[in-house]
Amino acid sequence: MSPKIILIHPPVAKCPEPPAGIARLSACLIENQIAHDVIDANLESILFLLRDEAGKHAGADRWTTRARKNMDSNLAAIRDISTYQNQSRYQKAVMDIHRLLNAAGKSLNIELSLADYQDKNLSPVKSVDLLSAAEKPQSNPFYPYFQNRLARALEDHPAFIGFSINYLSQALCAFAMIGFIKRMNPSQKIILGGSLITSWMKLGVRQNTFGGLADEIVEGAGEKRLLELCGVENSPGGPSTAYDNFPIDQYLSPGRVLPFSASRGCYWRHCAFCPEKAEGNAYRPLEVSQVTGELQKLTARMNPALIHLLDSSISPSLLDALARKPPGAPWYGFVRVTHHLADEDFCLTLKQSGCVMLKLGLESGDQNVLDRLHKGIDLEIASTVLKNLKKAGIATYCYFLFGTPPENAESAHKTMDFVVRHRDQIDFLNLAIFNLPARSVEARTLATRDFYHGDLSLYRNFEHPLGWHRPAVRSFLEKTFKKHPAIAHIVKRTPDFFTSNHAPFFVLMNRGGRESLTVES
């Protein structure tokens, strides 16, 4: 019998869908007949904490009391597609649930939400604080959940327990859980992986950084190393994704959402300040025929409400293939602005294939800024693309980045003008302030200082060469950009906490989408 593995997705991250990284690992283990369990501790712990908080009655203000009373109905509302016809009803349900989580964290000086975890005393970018979280697991708000859940898991005597850590918001909770495991069984083998671990390893983090808590840290794709640890010499193969071991109907979405990665890395890799390029991550796509075949099989088997393509950017060849061989369910993902999408007929074909929304990394409305960032985007083509997608009935979720080194106040106003001109073609907005990747080649040309004080920080602060510093950028966004009457109503459409994960459901319900998208209770 192959050694048993437990794969854990720790809190806190958004939970509208299963974690795709562990779904890939699980598919590999299933293909090689290796016994394993999956624990989505993120989903489980949030639901546990909500139930626990809902059982409290003393010392609450009116809002919190109402949120406790309506907890079950609010969770049901998020899982009901009809809620997405009424943004006010949706927003009330989400904000009430957030209120309960926030209340649960307050007593421990922790800012807790449906998408984030911030400890006011400990930082996830300080290895000493991660070790402190491991030393005092009982100080974690999820301790009442994981002390019993992990104790039961340890009864099965797993050979390895692997943690997939992808976001800073997961790090402190993951180490609190590891500390508890080591307290229960000091000899238990722990494996660390995930995109955050990979980025830390690129910074020079090694096994001893975590004080002996980790027996193995894995950079990049983990399938091959997992097989080696299990004594299996086969190369990873077979289906790339499996959801057999996930609580697929418990996630906070109105139907099953299947995340799927058709590639690792980015096929463009020319953008300045790109973390993928800085970390030397190669582009590794699956064969297009494998992707379309797997998606059709998954759809036939699992009847998803939505497919989420997770690629950094869906390649033009895959877009072509999806247009010719639709997956059989509504889908969305991130794309680059290409000549493909400047073809109106092609956009109509994508719509017919089930494409409900595309995320576009436009970044700036100033052509000079785009050119200096080597984005490979022509704003005239971008304008045509936005108009074509609107005509085809495909929603757009547009990403703009402010405060990059070549941008100044005039450039930022050009971006605002671009958005205003295309207000009828832009359905949702993601507005971000630029963070300088610590390892980017371009960072060497700037005067930098610590962004976060910590040995694990992935970013650097910098002196903006044009004087367009973060406080001024933030002020422009909050007081000028978001306040523009043509933009304000777009900003208000963004789903709280779940953002682009829930946006497609609003599109489906408000554009005559599939009315049959429901969750069975």
Image (spheres, rainbow, N blue to C red):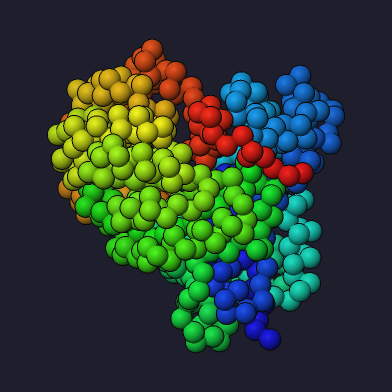
Q: Which residue is at the front of the view, 490 or 144?
A: 490
Query: Does residue 307 appear anywhere in the picture?
Result: yes
Q: Position of residue 452 (x, y in %)?
A: 41, 45
Image quadrant containing the C terminus: top right
Where residue 155 sits, quadrant-wise, is bottom right
Residue at 50%, 74% (x, y): give it.
238
**Residue under the image location 59 percent in, 57 percent down:** 300
Q: Is residue 339 above or below residue 285?
A: above
Please, which residue is most extreme toward the top here?
485
Q: Is residue 462 above or below residue 249?
A: above
Question: Can residue 447 be seen in this snapshot?
Answer: no
Which quadrant, please, contains the N terminus? Answer: bottom right
Please provide percent x and percent y for residue 100.
71, 33
Vertically, is 230 above or below 28? Answer: below
Residue at 25% x, 54% y is 268
Direction from residue 166 to residue 41 in the image, left or right: right
What x and y, as percent, mark residue 140?
A: 68, 49
Nearer the observer, 59 or 328: 328
Q: Is residue 88 left or right of residue 319?
A: right
